[in-house]
Image: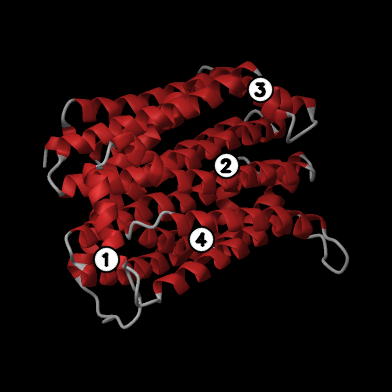
Amino acid sequence: MSAALLASRTQAMLHAPLLPTLFRLATPNVIGLFIATIAIGYDGYILGRLGADALAGVALVLPLAMLQMQMSAGGIGGAVTAAVARALGGGHREDANRLAWHALLIAAALALVFTIALLGLGPALYAAMGGKGAALDAALAYSTIIFGGAASVWFANVLGAIVRGSGNMLLPSLMISVGAISHLFLCPLLVFGWGPVPALGVTGAAISTVATNLLAAAVMAAHLLKHDGPVSLRGLNLGLRPDLLHAILRVGAPASLSPVLSNGSIAAATALIGSFGTAALAGYGVAARLEYIMVPIAFGFGTALTALVATNMGAGQHARALRATWHGGLVVTAITGSIGILVAIAPELWMDRFTSDPAVREIGATYLRIVGASYSLFGLGLALFFASQGAGRMFWPLAGSTARLAVVGIGGWFAVHVFDISAAGYFVFIAVSFAVYASMIAGAIRLGAWARH
């Protein structure tokens, strides 16, 4: 039954009408990530009740926490999904099982890197990004738990990627939903306390995040330990095979570097905006949190694009893979663009949910009015990033991320420190960086970059 189901899924990706197939694959992801989106916003709402220092402190950690999420779910995770899907599509089930084991080894190693690096370098890093006083204390409290429990995030996301590679989009999305709903209850309980549970402040929000990821990882590991699925972790030969590591890392390494650069852009922006004061940092942190909601939307369609493009490229159907890419890119552009226009017109719909501080609200509203109109391009760039993973062509997404960092970091530094522009002036640089990112990837694909080896 599993083999027949796998064959049916593969045939649909190769021959069924593209747009319905894309929506069928993406719908479970989008539903799960929509619920996760609510949790992201709710997390900010809860932390906003603790004051501007808590918001500013978490804003310092957020780029690095999202870097970990994007590397584990999108960078390495996307490469794992593509590698497993190619192996199963070629009838190499044993290789798919071995790829799953190698993916978990990579996840363990990278989780350890994040834990050691952020526990050791966190205090100096957050101070360099503009954190001081109570805001720095909040950042350190949140960071210690998030990165001390890095393995929970890495295993949850890589196990989900393995399951998606087998064609099962439902289970990972279900676990995203369960984790997000659990966080809605657990986060305020741990932040504010109730009965015998003490109030832990920002630490409580971090503990809730780690706990819900552990739950997701445990369920998906149990699923993969079954013998009758398309991919199984039972009875494996646990020896290392360099070719299987290479199959994951040849796409996963550059794909992981791209979010490093993207989040480097966010970290650079955070540091530069921190020079305008705590209210500016808090306002930016609240407003930019909306961009982290764009990432799950793009991820919902992007993981479907990764599998769809990889399957068709593997079968030699390059024209169909390109059509799938543009279909998916336009869908994500429409969704993220609509959200961006809405908040640009009425930023209070977002900002008023998180803070009552007028200075924080004003900075955040200014950011959304300027940057919101470019969210369609941000979404397009993200969608094309995932499609490029499926095609195994990661040079131009990497180049686009590098250019984005140059605009935000280098250009922004000169604008702020040499030409003394205002915070609003700097926000224009962020909007331009999204346009540069999307146009470089889209232009390269349109001009035939995927046809070059």
**Image quadrant in which the N terminus is located:** bottom left
Indicate the secondary structure of the residue bearing disc 4.
Answer: helix
Q: Earlier in the sequence, mark 1 or mark 2?
A: 1
Q: Position of residue 67 (x, y in %)?
A: 47, 48
Task: Verify CB contact (< 8 Å) between mark 4 and mark 1.
Answer: no
Q: Relative to 222, is 194 above or below?
A: above
- Report, in whole angstroms, how far the alpha carbon at label 3 lies from the one at label 1: 50 Å
Tell us which disc is closer to us: 4 or 1.
1
Amino acid of disc 1: Ala
Q: Which residue is mark 1?
A: 3
Tell us which disc is closer to us: 3 or 1.
1
Badge number at residue 153: 4
Q: Position of residue 26 (x, y in %)?
A: 41, 44
Amino acid of disc 4: Val
Q: Earlier in the sequence, mark 2 or mark 3?
A: 2
Q: Position of residue 367 (x, y in %)?
A: 60, 23
In this view of the protein, can residue 361 be seen by the observer?
yes
- Report, in whole angstroms, how far the alpha carbon at label 4 lies from the one at label 1: 30 Å
Q: Earlier in the sequence, mark 4 or mark 3?
A: 4
Q: Which residue is mark 2?
A: 129
